[in-house]
Image (spheres, rainbow, N blue to C red):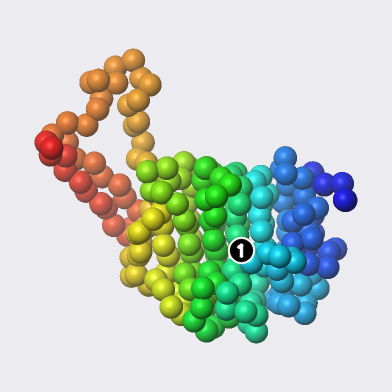
Amino acid sequence: MATPIVGLVNAKAYDTIQDAVDAVSSTGGSVFLPSGTYNSTSSPACVPAPGASSCVVLPGHVHLRGAGRDSTVLDLSGQSVDINGIEIQGDHTDVSHLTVNGQGSAGTGVGVWVNPQTISRQNIWLDSMIVRNAPGWSLYWQGNTSLFTIFSGAKRCRFYLNKSNGAALIGASTSPQSGSDPFSTGAPGGVAVGKPNAEDLFLKPGDVVECSIEGVLTLRNRIVAA
């Protein structure tokens, strides 16, 4: 087995994108994908490893970065519609500045899959991405919403033209509609638990909680007695 590399690797030095990911130490490292379109025949190739269901599987503490979402494209055209683009299996992971272009036909494959089986979904970020033409969901952020995400989310991303589901599924059942529903993850500031005066800070009937996406919308919820 090759010795993991700590730091930055250029995927161009490997046969497949997954080979580059595997070369990065699980204790932390980044994989850079230069400008270009990566498919099943490119170098590096964007194909699943034997036995895998996703073209790129990211463990924890690994960062996958392209040269820009209009410049670096993972193209799954021609591959099985049951294959996923990117699968995140570890915490403290991010994907940024690239596009995932799906197979263009309906199926079960998703553009980006946050797999909850091996992670607690902490500090996972998607930034400056386009995910389009996925057979199923563009983004499948799976798991129980009561355990869902600490300091995680998607920003400056576009999810569209997916073929058989909505733009994203978040948690167990939340399904924003493609091209129309913005979504924000995480908790607003001011968590009371653990503070000496917590009892004075807990929400009470009549309080209003506001969460905003600047320039887009503000969500207001008024607290009422049970």
Q: Nearer the viewer, residue 170 or 116?
A: 116
Q: Residues within 10 Å of mark 1 (few under 14, many from 20)?
A: many
To which residue does mark 1 refer? 86
Occupied quadrant, residue 87: bottom right
Q: Is residue 206 left or right of residue 32?
A: left
Q: Where in the figure is residue 34, as x and y percent of width and height?
A: 74, 66
Q: Nearer the viewer, residue 143 or 199?
A: 143
Q: For residue 203, say whether it is visible.
A: yes
- Residue type at mark 1? Ile
Q: Where in the figure is residue 12, as x and y percent of width and height?
A: 81, 66
Q: Nearer the viewer, residue 143 or 151?
A: 143
Q: Where in the figure is residue 52, as x and y percent of width and height?
A: 68, 64
Q: For residue 70, say whether it is visible.
A: no
Q: Residue furthest right?
A: 2
Please name the residue shown 61% across and 52% down the image. 89
Q: Residue furthest top?
A: 196
Q: Is residue 196 left or right of residue 65?
A: left
Please name the residue shown 54% across and 61% down the image. 113
55 lies above or below 114: below
37 lies above or below 184: below
Q: Secondary structure at mark 1?
A: strand
Occupied quadrant, residue 115: bottom right
